[in-house]
Image (cartoon, rainbow, N blue to C red):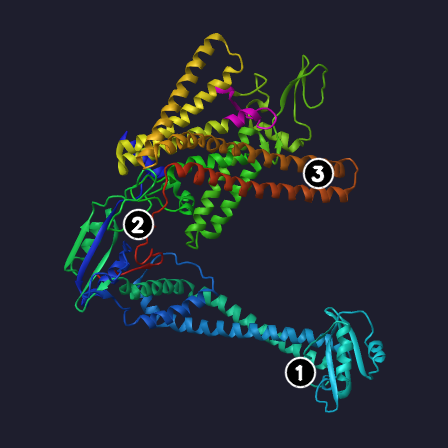
Amino acid sequence: MQLDLEWGEIMVGEMTNRPMARFVVAGLRSKLDDVMHRLVALNAIDIIDFDGEDGDEFDLGSPRSDHEDIAKQLTTYRSVSNWVSPENPEAKVQESKVREWLSGSLGEAVSDAAKKIERIEDLTSLINSSKERVQSLEDFSLLGVDLDLLYGYRNATPLVGRISGKSSVNSALKSAGVSGFVAEAKTENGRLCVVVVRNEDADKASKELDSLGFTAVQPPSGKGSPSSELSAENKNLNSLAEEKKNLEDALEDWSSSHGSEFICGLELLERDFVESTAPTRIAVSKHAFVVDGWVVADRVAEVQGSLDSLCSHIHVDTDVAPKHHGLHGHHDEHDSPSPPIAFGDHGLSKPMELLTDAVGRSDYGKIDPTVFMLFTYPLFFGLMLGDMLYGLMTLGLGGLVYMKTKDSGNELGILGAKLLSYIGVSTIIFGYIYGEFAGFEILPHYHCEAALHAAGGYSSGGCHWVFTDGVPSWASSLSIMYPYGGEFLNHHNLFEANLPMGVVLAFPFHRVTGNLTDLILLTIYLGVVHLMVAFVLGAIDEIKHGHGWSGALFGKVSWMLVLGGGFFFSYAYLILQGNPSENYEALLSDIQMGGAIAAGVGVLLIIVHLTHENVPLPVALLLGPIEAIGMLPTTLSYVRLFAVGIVGVKIAEAGNGLLYPMIVEGFSTGGSILVAIVALFGWFAVQIFAWVLGVFSPNIHAARLHFVEWMRQFYTASGKPFAPLGGRSRFVEVDSGQ
C-alpha cells in the first residue's frame, strides 16, 4: 500500500506544500561576500528582509563595491537581449569559463553589438523622418511649384496648407477682393494649396482660407523643384534602409556566433547583480552580519554544511507551525512571519500550478488542491466542450505552444502548453462519448415510425437506423470508430447504467438529442461530489492545523450535513412525486426523513458555530438557516457545465445547418460555385469561432467553479510564494566557492 501511495505521489503530485525551516546565520562582516556568494549559488534561502527594529547595533547593509559596474554591464546585456534571438547552450558551462568570456571576447562582442543596435535605433529615426519628407515632397511635386517660391518674401506672405472644403480657393479669394498666386493639387491626404498674397492682404486671405477648412502645413525644405528633391530623398531613404538591413543581418550572424556565450553571460550577470545587492536586505553591524530566512526543510543539511566554515553561528528551527485560523478565517496573532510556500513535487499535476497561483498560494501546512484539479479541471472542461474536432485543435494548439517554448526556458509557456494538452485530450474523450465532431452528431439513431422511411439507413419491421438530418458522409463515416459502427445491438446504447434520480449514464451519451435531462442532473451530482470533497479537505485541515475536531465538526462537517442532507431530501422528494412502487416509496420516505434530519443537525451546528464567533443568539437563529439555504445556489451553479456546453453545440449546429447545405449544393448539384466558396469560408469561420469560444468560455467557467464555488469552502490564499535568493541556474554551473 505504501509503495502504491508513493508511486501515486510521483505520478500525480504531492497533496501538501513542502515543509520549511527557519534559518538564521551570523558571522564576521569580512565573510559576508563569501556567504552571499554561497547562498546565491545554493538557490535555497528566501531572505526575510531586515526591518531595522533591532536597536542601534544593526542596520541595513550596503551594496557590494562593484555593484554599479555590474549594473552598467547588465544594462548593456539586457538591451542587447531585446534585439537578438540566440539558441540556448546544449549543456551547462562552468562559471569560471563564462567569466573569462565576460572579461574578454564576449565583452568586446557585446559592446560591438550594442553599437550596432544604437546605430539601428538612430537609423530607424532617420528613416521615419525621411519617409515623412518623401511623402511631403510627393504631395508638393503635384503643385508644380519650386520649393524656393515657398520661402523668403519681404512684401508677400505665403500660405501653405490643406483644404477640407470643396469650394475653389481662387473664387473665395476673388470674392474677398484678394489677388495673388494660387496653386492647388489633389493628394491622398486631401487638397494641398499654396497661396502667395501681398502682406496687407494676408489677414483677409487667412480668413477666407479658414472658411474652407484650411490647415497650415510646413513645406519641405530645399531648393528647386520638389521632384528633384524627391529623387535625392528617395536615394537617401534607400541608403538608410540598406544600412539598417545590413546591421540587422550582422546582428543575426552575431547571434549565431556569440549567442550561447551571450546567454550564459547574461545569466551570470543577473546572478551577480542579485548577489551584489543582497546585503541591502540583511542586518549588519560594524563587525558582524545576520541573515534570516526560510529554507526548504529537506535542504537544511546541505545549506548548513555549505556555510559551516564561514559562519560563527547557525540556528535552524524545523518546528514551524502553520498560521492558526479561526472558524471564519480569523488569524491568531503571531510574532514570527509565516513561512513562504514552496510547491511539492506535482508530477503530472504541475500544469495545474497555473490555476493555483492565479488564486494565490495556500497557507503554510494546508492541503494543496493542485493535485485534485488534475482530475476535476479537465473533466469539467471536456464535459462542456465535448467535440472531437475541437479537442484535436486544442491539443494541436498545446503542441504548437510547447514547440515554441520548450527551448526558451519559459516555464509558464511550457506549463500552459501541457494544460492545453490535458483539456484537449479530455475534450476528445468527451467528444467520443457524445459522438460529436465539428458540431455534427456522427452516430445514427434507432427510430421506429408508423410509416417506413428507407432514407438514411436500412429498415427492419418499421424501425431503422438513421443519422440526424444534415450530417455529411465524411462525418457519419467516423462512426466506424465505434463498436458495430455505432449501430448497437440493443438499438440504444453499447453501455447503459441507471443511476438514482433517473439519471442514465450511457455510451454514447447523446447530450442534445437524447440525454439532455440526464446531463443536467449529472452536473448537479458532480457539484455535490465536488463540494463534498472540498468540505472533507477543509475538515482535514481543521483537524491538523486548525481548531482540531471541534473546528472540523462545527466549521466543515456541519456544511457536509447540510449539503448531503439537503441533496438526499430533494432526491427523495422529487422521486416521490413520480408515484413510485410501494416498496420503493417506503425507502424514499426514509431517505427523505434522514436527509431532513441531517440537514437540520447541520443547521444547528452552524448556529452553534455562529454563537461561538460572538454572534448574538437571536441573530444566529436567523442567520444559520439563511446561510444553509445559500448552499442551494452554490450547488446549482454547477449546471453551467451543461448550459455552456449546449450553447457551444448550438452555435456549431447553426453554422452547420445554415452554411453546409449551401456548400453541398454549390459543389455537387450544379449550384453557384461562388456561393459555395463563400459558404465554405463562412463554415470554417463558424468552426473557428465555436472552437475559440469553446476554449475561452469553458476555461472561464471551469475556473470559476474551482476558484469560487469549490476553493472558498476550504482554501485561504494568503501564502507567499517561496523565492530563494539567486534564482534557478539554467545555463551556468555556478561555483559555490567551497
Q: Which residues are drawn in magenta?
A: 498-521
Q: Which amino acid type corresponds to the residue marked 2 in the rendered image? A: Pro
Secondary element under disc 3, as helix, strand or loop, is helix
Q: Is residue 137 above or below residue 531?
A: below
Q: Which residue is mark 2?
A: 340
Q: Looking at the image, is mark 2 or mark 3 earlier in the sequence?
A: 2
At x 50%, y 66%, the residue is 252
Secondary element under disc 1, as helix, strand or loop, is loop
Observer able to see residue 498: no
Report whether 261 appears left or right of 23: right
Q: Nearer the viewer, residue 233 or 298?
A: 298
Report whether 85 appears left or right of 103: right
Q: Is residue 521 above or below residue 145?
A: above
Q: What is the C-alpha distance between the residues marked 3 and 1?
A: 59 Å
Q: Is residue 679 above or below residue 444?
A: below
At x 29%, y 42%, the residue is 365
Q: Nearer the viewer, residue 78 or 19?
A: 19
Q: Categorize mark 1 by other alpha carbons within 10 Å: few (<14), some (14-19), many (20+).
A: few
Question: Residue 286's quadrant in the figure?
Answer: bottom left
Spot occupied by residue 344 in the image (x, y as percentages of width and height): 32, 43
Spot occupied by residue 718 in the image (x, y as percentages of width and height): 35, 47
Name the image quarter holding the C terminus: bottom left
Q: Residue furthest bottom?
A: 154
Determine contact: label 3, label 1, CB under 8 Å.
no
Q: Categorize mark 2 by other alpha carbons within 10 Å: few (<14), some (14-19), many (20+).
A: many
Q: Which residue is mark 1?
A: 221
Q: Marks 3 and 1: which is nearer the front?
A: 1
Q: Is residue 238 magenta?
A: no
Q: Which residue is mark 3?
A: 659
Q: Categorize mark 3 by other alpha carbons within 10 Å: few (<14), some (14-19), many (20+).
A: many
Q: Looking at the image, is mark 3 or mark 1 earlier in the sequence?
A: 1
